[in-house]
Amino acid sequence: MIRCSDLHLTFNRGAPTERLALRGVTLDIPAGEFVTVIGSNGAGKSTLLNALAGDYQPESGAITIDEQDVTAWPSHRRAGLVARVFQDPLAGTCGDMTVEENLALAAGRGNRRGFGLALDAGRRDRFRDTLRDLGLGLENRLGAQMGLLSGGQRQSVSLLMAALQPSRILLLDEHTAALDPKTAAMVMGLTDRIVRDQKLTTLMVTHSMRHALDHGDRTIMLHEGRIVLDIAGDKRKGLTVQDLLDQFARVRNEALDDDKLLLG
Amino acid sequence: MSVIALLGSVEIGLVYALVAFGVYLSFRVLNFPDLTVDGSFPLGAAVAATLITKGVDPFIASFAAVLAGAAAGLVTAVLNLRFGILHLLASILTMTALYTVSLRVMGGPNVPLLMVDTVLTPFQGFGMPDYWMKPILFAVITVLVALLLARYLNSESGLALRATGSNPRMARANGISTDAATYLGMGLSNGLVALAGALFAQANGFADATMGIGTIVIGLAAVIIGETLLPARSVLWMLLACLAGSVMYRLAIGFALNADVLGLTASDLNLMTALLVGLALILPRLKREAASRRAKRTQTARPTAASPTAGDKP
């Protein structure tokens, strides 16, 4: 389904602030798999997601989705295959447009946008039904400005928007990090439901080791632009948060030793 | 102020409402501060006037003016999107170049439109004096354009345009080519401004290379006055507010110039416009600041009524 082969990506190449964000990421994700991605700050988690979505172009390596080489596709062209939810609730929606207009925008993902009215009675009914499932009372606020909604509500709508139009891949970039624990749990529940119902191939970046183990089928850990841990199945089932933290510490120390060797 | 002067102000206000729509599209919808309009307004006038004097049908000439304006907008968009020139600078470059283009199109600094048929000619047979007919005709045209534009901005493609200005990253994530949307919006915006130039030239009987000076400020004035006096949320009402803002701006200027006590002359127009726009921009901010000061004062006056967390702080 998704295949990344030997992705390399550098920020500010040649400048003093040069940073190797991805150094040889190879990853194969079969259709329908839900992968959680963990790693410390600057490990390359978000960069990997952005590279998959087409925001960044890798210097070398290739990305194929559904047997199609999409490496050179800009993000808007990949949007028919890839749906995303960002960390910042403000980032995934247009705050100065209404709830229904935002949903209409998402409903057009992957289609040609013509001159027909974006909203009609049929679409409004469909949106109302979708929003009712959330149980947040948003079905009565179709005409409200998106900016008036709370962070949790906006993030929930972002998730709905990502699922409104069939796609193959769902990319979630710490999409509950900006929410309070209760809202985060609600959004995670909604995430599980959408992923299951639509059989989406999903990558979810998270800072919560708990979320990383409790959700999905497979967990990968990134460190300094490389995949250092990749577990699934029974091996993953037995794992505790503490195991993961130990693993994390071990990887970090190893990396430090590497650097020491280089410097020495 | 006489009735004729009053209607004259309304007429110019209505023509400049088209400029306001263009400025609303670039500044507000696309979030693209575009000064090209100072060049596309006289360009529209120059193209229409020159073609009309060459015997071209005035409606076709006006349409050609729209295309010329749209092309000017596209040039600015290419400079910005393809070559990464800052939008303001890109639009200033185009605007500067357009001054020469307009002179070349006209073959001189101005073109008079006397004794020729214009888009106004077919409407002169109704026995209505020109000073009534022109504002009524322009009111019909601008309201029609507002309706069409609002209909477009509520279409799938129009929504994509609005998302591009509001949140480009989200727009791309939803499959919108923000570049394509910006090209479209900039073409549309400057096409509207050129249409205003073409109509202005035909209503006043001349096109002049210097008639574009200050167009952007007048357009912005209309948008800001409209937004301040008639805050609206739906696209159609926003456009109608721009229209009303444009007419009100002209009336304000007209009254100021006609008030003998003020001793103002036509040459004071630009300073007055700048003052008016400046005030319209400053006042809402001062109002907000005063409101927050008042809120703070009531909070400190009644400390017990403050939020419960305030007690935790040392």
Image (tube, rainbow, N blue to C red):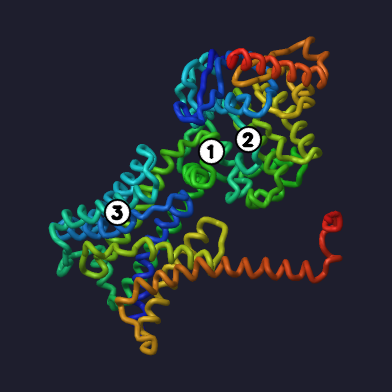
Q: Are marks 3 and 2 on the same chain?
A: no
* Quadrant where the image shows the N terminus of chain B: bottom left
Q: Which numbered disc covers residue B169? A: 1
Is residue B46 shown left or right of residue A166? left
Label 2: state its secondary structure: loop
Q: Which mark is first along the chain, 1 or 3? A: 3
Q: Vertically, is B229 above or below B59?
A: below
Quick one: B59 or A94, which is closer to the camera?
A94
The location of residue B274, given as percent across then percent down, is: 40, 69
Residue at the spot of label 2: A86
Task: Answer whether labels 1 and 2 touch (C-beta < 8 Å).
Answer: yes
Q: Residue at x 54, y 70 (%)?
A: B283
The amino acid type of the residue labelled 1 equals Arg
The image quadrant that residue B4 belongs to is bottom left
Pointer 2 local density, CA inside 10 Å: few below 14, some 14–19, many at least 20:
many
Quick one: A260 or A38, which is closer to the camera?
A260
The amino acid type of the residue labelled 2 equals Phe
The answer to whether residue B191 is seen in the rendering is no
Label 1: state its secondary structure: helix
Pointer 1 chain: B
* Quadrant where the image shows the C terminus of chain B: bottom right
Q: Vertically, is B233 above or below A42?
A: below
